Every structure is written in C-alpha cells, then in structure tokens.
Amino acid sequence: MAEAVQAKNLRTMVRLRGVRKDYGTVAALQDTDLDVPTGEFLTLLGPSGSGKTTLLNMIAGMASPSQGEIIINGRDVTRLPAEKRGIGMVFQNYALMPHMTVFENIAFPLQIRKVPKAEIRRRVTDVLELVRLPHVADRKPKELSGGQQQRISIARCIVYKPDLILMDEPLGALDKKLREQMQLEIKRIHSELGITMLYVTHDQEEALNMSDRIMLMNAGRVEQLGTPHALYFEPRTQFAADFIGASTLLDAEIVDAGATPLLRLADGTNCRLRLDSNVSAGTAGKLLLRPEALRLVQDGNVPAGHNVLHGHVANTLVTGATSKHFVTVEGGAVIAVQELTNQNTARFDPSQRVCIVWPADVGRFLES
C-alpha cells in the first residue's frame, strides 16, 4: 500500500495542500491546493499582487508558507532550504556572471556539484546545441543579445537536469518580437526535454500561447484553473472573462430560462443564448462577447437566427493582419468587433450605421 501511494506521488511533480502565506494581517496567498503532473507546463497568471510570485517563491524555497504542505517529486520540502530542493530557476534579469564566458556560466552549477570535467564538457556542449547557440561558448554575456542571454540562462538551468524548472517573468525585459521568438524556443525545449515547468507572467497572450494549463490568480486566491481553451472560451467568473483575452461585458438578465434562454440587456435589447448551466429567470449577470466572434453588417443584411445590436462606427484600427472596429450601440456601450484584414474586408466609414450580429452559441452568460 505504501509503495502504491509513493508511485502516485511520483506522477505528481508538485503537490500543494492548504498552502498559505500571511504578512501580519494581510493574506498574500489564501489556502491553496494544487497538483502539477510530471512534464506539465503550468503558468501562474494574474495581475500584480495576485499572489503568483509569492506562490512560486514558496515552491522554490525562497519563502516559507505560514501553513500548509509542499511536496516535490514525492518528497515533503515544506521546510527544506532552496538549495536542497533540486529546482532550476530562470529569472527576468538573466543572472549571468559577466566575468565568465558562456561555457563557464553554464558549467558553473556542474562544477559546484563536482561533476567530472569530461562530463561537464559533454553536458555543456549538449545544452548549447539544444538552445541553438553552440557558436557562442567562448563569448562573454555582454557580447550577446537579450534573447541569446536568456537562452544561456535557460541552458545553465537545465544542464544539471533538475526535476522542476521555475520561471519568473523570464521574458519581461525583451521586446515584443523577441518575446514571441523566445516563447517558441521555451515551448520547444519543454517539448524535447519533458521537464515540469512552472511559469509566472502577467501577460495573458504569453500564458495562452505556451501553457498546458493556466492557474489564473486574483487577490491571493485561485480564480480559475484549466487549459487555455477553457479559460478563454469557458471563463467561470467575470474577472476571468475580463482578464483573459479582449472582451465586452454587457449588463444582462435572464428573462426566459427555456432551452435557449432569452436575455435582456440594459438597453432593452433581447437576445438568445445557449447555456451550459441551469439558471432561473430573474438572474442578473453579464453577457460576454469576444470581438472575433462578432460580425458587422449593414442594415437589412442580418443573417437569420442571429442576435443583433444596432449602432454606429466610432473608430477603426487596422493592425496589419486584423482590423478592429469600435461600435457605439444604442444605450452608449462601445463594443469591439475584430475581423481579418484582406482585400474583401468591408469598409465602414466613421459614424456609419451598422449592425453587430452573432449566433446564440458564441456568447456566454456570467452570473453576478
């Protein structure tokens, strides 16, 4: 029986039970339970002050929980010092030693572990190949670009084969194009090595692009935990809907709780919506509409069976691949409608009267 329990624990790389962090009377992290399977890429996402870095620091051993239990790879590490947890860390500031070459920087964690020189050379050579920088071994960090330095920081982390890698805003100092390139590199390395990764960011696009699962945090607690698809298309709360992806949230009330419930918006407009949960008439909440799920048409061209809001075009932003129209609807709300930009894209003049249309299965009702 004990062996079966141990085997189960080993399939879970990180297990938290009732972990909490208090600073005086302030709860930086409320009671939190979490299981991270071996090999998963889990992102801790949330605004500043949500508790994501506090949680990461406790897993790393750089902060002690006020209560609760932290188990890594089947071992209780709750009171174990950081250096004895066998964890790799990647920071935003790279933390490379400027007086050492790239080879020496990567080799350093192996040297302090007294790995034989021949093995050090082999491992450093292998990880430089993995991060696609075998030609920079003899350079100093200052001779590298920001993206190269971050890849060397990752190489130094994985060279001693940790069971778990923690990344705290590792791409925060990079420009947008370089961030996107590094996202692909980190995903590739994760896929090739199968190492469990916990990644902290406040960038929702980064989380959606990279994660197996996302743990969205808000005010020191877990708001929602699930796949990127679930958080984007099936947010459970208004906070999750507003934080993940662009969205419009309109005040709404259920007026008919039939098979396809009828909602009434604040301006009196009625619309149909398919729901995945039971709600009763009189329930107040918000109607969530994603910009890419909406279409703009001219009066008289509303497709059959679609919901419709009437308004006028306030502004249009063309950002290359996509165009985003901002429409002021009756009642004063401004709704964003996004479409792909191409030669056949309809042109809408400022102040032009238009209709926003959407089928019943693309909106989502969130109770207050």
Image (tube, rainbow, N blue to C red):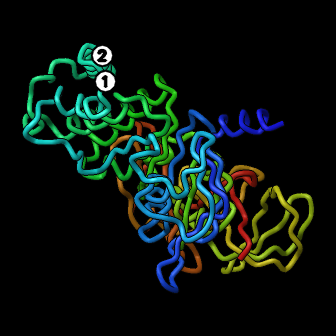
Query: Quadrant of the rendered structure where residue 10 is?
Result: top right
Q: What element does badge 1 sit on? A: loop
Q: Which mark is residue 119?
A: 2
Q: What residue is drawn where x is 53% and y is 66%?
A: 65
Tell me which amino acid carries mark 2.
Glu
In the displayed structure, 114 sits above or below 312; it is above
Q: What element does badge 2 sit on? A: helix
Asked whether residue 124 appears in the rendered view, the answer is yes
Q: What residue is drawn where x is 60% and y is 35%?
A: 38
Report whether 337 appears left or right of 321: right
Q: Residues within 10 Å of mark 2 (few under 14, many from 20)?
A: few
For the N terminus, the image quarter is top right
Q: Residue 340 appears at what percent x and percent y?
A: 46, 42
Q: What residue is drawn where x is 77% and y is 39%?
A: 5
Provide the residue designation for mark 1: 115
Query: Quadrant of the rendered structure where residue 136 is?
Result: top left
In the displayed structure, 50 sits above or below 158; it is below
For this orientation, the residue located farthest to the bottom is: 25
Q: Residues within 10 Å of mark 1 (few under 14, many from 20)?
A: some
Contact check, label 1 and label 2, Cβ < 8 Å: yes
User: Disc 1 versus disc 2: distance between alpha carbons?
Assistant: 7 Å
Tell me which amino acid carries mark 1.
Val
